[in-house]
Amino acid sequence: MDYAAARTKMVDNQIRTTDVTSHSVLAACLTVPREAFVPPHLKALAYIDADTQVAPAAAGMPGRYIMEASPLAKLLQLAAITKDDLVLEIGCGTGYVSALLSSLAGSVVAVEQDETLANAATQTLSSLGYDNVAVVTGALEQGYAAEAPYDVIFVNGSVEVVPEALLSQLREGGRLVAVVGYGNAARARLYVKAGGVTSYTDYFNASVKPLPGFRKLAEFVF
């Protein structure tokens, strides 16, 4: 299979057609080999217009996926990442988005709670030369305070709530991009910290697969 041709077709048919105009995002999507980050039996399907499962649901946790190309590229564009940015990725999975972020940012810290996925991400990223990414293990909702503050936090999947633990790790002027909500009603949201206060704006609907660990706490009604 000609993966380079499939990559070009993905960019032309799935990404450019959905209002993604960022040259850096388009270039990253054209160069990062998505097929290297999926299970071997799914390599031929790496560039279809759909989420790609990289780990099944287990122990009450949802399955893990590489996000389909269009919403992923739109979220990356929304983050407006530059080579001056230190980026925290939440939920790196097998490392595909980490590789895209590597191409966009100065350096990347990628958090993954599944040790098997984290090890796979580390090996693949290293073998492909993405040496400005450090994969760490830990609870996704806690982020990685040891390297904070971050210029950008990219949440790689949908969440029910963005916890304060993540927002507190933003630098002044920093941005956090997440899809908040589940299913077709979920919204791509950009948080910005200014004057020590974090506010957000919703931008577009985006139905993407959920990350584990971001449910709201149950509320008691009297």
Image (cartoon, rainbow, N blue to C red):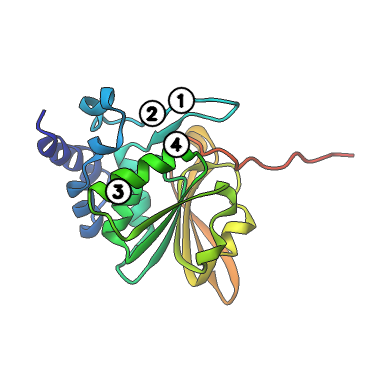
Q: Residues within 10 Å of mark 1 (few under 14, many from 20)?
A: few
- Give the residue drawn at x 63%, y 58%: 164
Quarter of the figure that contains the C terminus: top right
Please tell me which of labels 3 and 2 falls first in the chain. 2
- Tell me where residue 154 appears, x and y as whole percent: 44, 54
Q: Are marks 3 and 4 in contact (CB under 8 Å)?
A: no
Query: Reading the chain from its start, which is encountered first: label 3 or label 4?
Result: 4
Say which residue label 1 marks: 56
Q: Residues within 10 Å of mark 4 (few under 14, many from 20)?
A: few
Residue 145, quarter of the rendered image? bottom right
CA gap between label 4 and label 2 equals 15 Å
Q: Point out the frontmost of discs 3 and 2.
A: 3
Report the disc number at residue 53: 2
Please state which amino acid type lies under the numbered disc 1: Pro
| Dot label at residue 125 | 3
Q: Residue at x 27, y 44 (%)?
A: 18
